[in-house]
Amino acid sequence: MAHQRHNPSALRDPKVSIVIPVYNEKSTIDEILRRVLDTEVRKEVIIIDDCSTDGTRQILENMAARQANGEAFAPAQDGGDQIELRDLRIFFQTPNQGKGAALRRGFAQITGEVVLVQDADLEYDPRDYPNCWSRSSRAARMWCTARGSWAGHSVYITSGTTLRTGC
């Protein structure tokens, strides 16, 4: 099925697919999810655990189980506010396949008009998401490290990923 390509700066209230590849982020996973979920954009949050071994996978498995049972929230393991489960879609890789494979798995799940990649290490601030597709935004050029497309979707890389095509 061919996807219609969109000019992100022309979109009004786009649905944003936020892809979060995760590997051994036990100390930051709750906080990054709270920050992403607090953004004021229509969104889906696609989390791909790449076979974490530090307890991250168990945290995400617990969230997925609670979500499957119809629960709206999961307790945070970091002692902070609980995590809302409504916009989360959680996937698990076995065995560890690397960040590229996790991203491809996430990209295969997207339903939004705009796609953002958010690393789970708290380096980038999700409050800057709208700047990424604002054509006139100087902050977008500084914050968004890469821009490309995947199956007709605009993809913004918000991390130090090696793909560099400019913003």
Image: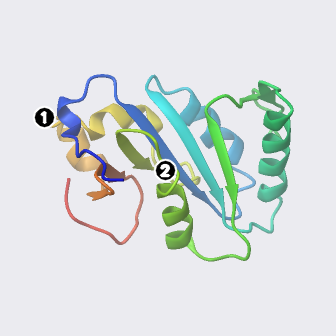
- How busy is the neighbourhood of tag 1: few (under 14 within 10 Å), some, or many (20 plus)? few
Instruction: Give the residue at mark 2.
Output: 118
The color scheme shown is: rainbow
Vertical arrangement, residue 2 with respect to residue 15, above or below: below
Vertical arrangement, residue 120 with respect to residue 132, above or below: below
SS under mark 2: loop
- The numbered disc on residue 40 is none
Q: Amino acid at mark 1?
A: Ser
User: Horizontal and vertical percent for residue 108?
Assistant: 49, 57
Q: Which residue, as the protein is rendered here, is positioned at the far front?
A: 1
- Counting residues from the start of the chain, the first of labels 1 and 2 encountered is 2
Instruction: Give the residue at mark 1.
Output: 136
From the viewer's perspective, is 43 left or right of 70? left
User: Horizontal and vertical percent for residue 163?
Assistant: 32, 69
User: Horizontal and vertical percent for residue 66?
Assistant: 85, 35
From the viewer's perspective, is 67 left or right of 144? right
- Residue at the spot 21% in from the left edge and 48% down from the top edge: 141
Q: Nearer the viewer, residue 124 or 98?
A: 98
From the viewer's perspective, is 167 left or right of 115? left
SS under mark 1: loop
User: Horizontal and vertical percent for residue 159?
Assistant: 42, 58
Mark 1 and mark 2 residues within 8 Å of each other at the beta carbon: no
Vertical arrangement, residue 70 with respect to residue 49, above or below: above
